[in-house]
Image (spheres, grey):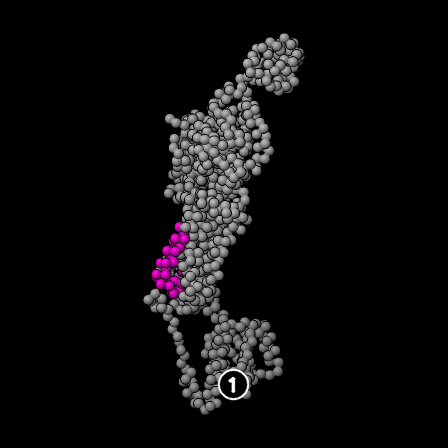
Amino acid sequence: MHKVWAVIRREFVERVRTKWFWISAILGPVLFAGIIVFQIVQSVGGAVRHIAVVDSTSADYGTRVVESLGASRLIRATRVPAGPGVIDSLTRLVEAKQLNGFLIISNQLTETGKAEYRASNLSLQTIEELQRALNRLLVKVRLEERGVNPAVVEYAQSLRVTLDQKKIARGRTTEESAGQSFIMAYVIAILLFMAILLYGVNVMSSVLEEKRDRIVEVLVSSLRPFQLMLGKVCGAGAVSFFQFLIWGVSARVLISLRVPIARALGADTASASSMTLPHVPFATLAVFMAFFLGGFLLYSAMFAAVGAMSSNEQEARQAQQPVTYLLMISYLSIIGLTNDPSSTFAKTLSVVPFTSPIATPVRWTAGSMGIGELVLSLAMLAIAIVGVTWVAARIYRVGILMTGKRPTIKELVRWVRTA
Amino acid sequence: MSDPVVVDRVTKRFAGHTAVDALSLSVPSGLIYGLLGPNGAGKTTTIRMIMDIYEPDEGSVRLFNDVAGGRTHSARIGYLPEERGLYPKMRVLDVLTFLAETKGVARKTARAKSLEWLERLGLADWRLRKVSDLSKGMQQKVQFISAVLHDPELVVLDEPFAALDPVNRQVLLDTVIDFRRRGKTVLFSTHIMEHAEQLCDRLCIIARGKKLIDGSLAEVKRTRGGKHLIVAFDGSQGGARQVFADRRLVAKLQDFGQQAELELAPGADAQEILRALIDSGARVSHFELASPSLHKIFVDLVGPDAATAAANPETGRERETARA
């Protein structure tokens, strides 16, 4: 065990000492801080849009649109009477960035509901606000045409529905919105995919290095190949956990610093403090970690075998393709999984051990998975880890001492049988 | 006490050829044992089987009177492989510490010992440099340290002196001789006979996977030589040529003009040749009944093999490893 420990320590220390480890360790939080700052800056009011309302209606609806838009925090509107050359001069203003855009309304508005918005940047938020304002106006105008008292119309429109979204998952009702759990499942899937691929390939290149630089012969004279492989996989795994830890801690620190950051940027501290990470329940974190660990063990054993059967980087890159494709299946299914986490497709993916490391945490986060299914998925994964490691260790054992051409499938089968 | 290394009729086949063929040898304790042979003779394969890296197809290897294999006894064995391997990006001190740890040495002891050995072999200033910054010769010394750092009872060195300049070679030779003084057993392979002659107490010559001869250096020289004559002339050779041509006296002749090396015919007496030479009018300035050099014995034994195997050593090696 002392020997395996020495291998783990070497793997960990040497990897953490590299530039690349620290570049990615720092890049993560920098990216995260960037997102926070971006959100704060957006809420500062840089997003207020100045628009003109070009009005050619006979009933002067333009003034009413401007009035109705006056309630919006995001839009400052001014009425411009339609006339020859107005559109052209406004277009020039937009191009000169002195105006964000302009709305064109005519008598058609009340007849067919048509209006036009031209802008340099068609932001969804602005368009929604404009549409809402025009809709309200249209309803009001039409009701007034039929003789309904404007005060009654005002009264009818004064109330808006707020639809509270709550999620029922595993017997509990949470505040999480549909968007939030979708994004969270998506982020988890991407994180898992990246981490498994990155650190699995790390194991492969480390095996390859020992083989290419002939270190393995010395090592194998004092360690069993399996001990060596175990040490390698655990060492690389520890590095990835360390990386996650750095990211996690710095994300927490940045979130707790969001109010001072907002103040430093002169932004509204209230809006900054409302900005939070979605709450991650402990069970979700545990599932994430368990399946990351399982997926990592499963795939890094395969990557170790790939490294052992290749003699150089180029060969390894070719030989790793089947393994990468296997992992890609779950990556390509992420959208399908997050859209409908309880479909038969999603259920199948979370039982098959090669896709479950990504599929199961996604389904769990989306709340469409029972404990029974989770246990089944874990059990399948555990069985696969034992089986795959057994095969990989045999390929590894024979492969690390080989030079020359890459083995054929037939030869591989023989290695596994006889090793 | 039984011998620390006993190889009993081991055979190792790689697809297409037999690398080692029913080879037996026994390395006695406290001696320097040379495994000699031309390139591709099966030296490295034999050593890898001793080190438990390859499994023999037939036969067995016993280390310290135990069939459990080299890995079980790795703390008592030091190994310098033929193809050197160190982590190029690691610091010298870290590599040595790590390799010692894999032999079961505690981390602290490993560091202290590494520093001690680096000092001893003149590499102390390089301890914090990366392995890749070192010259080939220095890397070789680092690898050597990794083989002996844990103070093993048995040191197995596969071509330890290749690619070293004379000064560093002498440093390693002295170290190996020091091991013997301290009662350690050394098994080393080489195809350079001068090294073997300087070092070996016992030796084994193999070619094409088969043993040709083994025994103590003196024994080998006695059985293979003793009938080896060096004659030098001072000006006149008289009728020396006729004397040398006499098949009853001389079996083999290498004539260098003013000097000749010859092998006596079976049953011939050296004195008879000396008398015949003087009678023939030759002026003899040097007459020596010498034991042959190991080099000569080696070339005599494996001559044609050595020539064919050495012609293509690279492919020989490739074959050996590619089909384990």
Horizontal and vertical percent for residue B109?
39, 37
Q: Disc 1 designates what residue?
A: A110
Q: How many marks?
A: 1
Q: Identify the residue shown where x is 57% and y is 35%.
A: B313
Q: Position of residue B249 (x, y in %)?
A: 59, 14
Q: Position of residue A340 (x, y in %)?
A: 43, 67
Residue B220, magenta (yes or no): no
| Frontmost residue, A167 versus A245 | A167
| Residue at position x 47%, y 45% in the image | A414
Q: From where the camera sits, is residue A297 visible?
A: no
Task: Indicate whether A256 appears above or below B207.
Answer: below
Residue at 57% from the left image edge and 29% from the top image edge: B305
Foreground residue, A183 or A316? A316
Q: Amino acid at mark 1?
A: Thr
Q: B198 or A137, which is in the foreground? A: B198
Q: From this view, report whether residue B1 is shown above or below residue A367.
A: above
Q: Is residue B312 above or below residue A7?
A: above
Write the start and end of the magenta stretch as one range: A360-386
Give the percent coordinates (x, y) of residue A354: 44, 56
Q: Secondary structure at mark 1?
A: helix
Q: Is residue B208 left or right of residue A285?
A: right
Chain label for disc 1: A
Residue at 50% across, 28% down:
B211
Identify the residue at the far left of this view.
A171
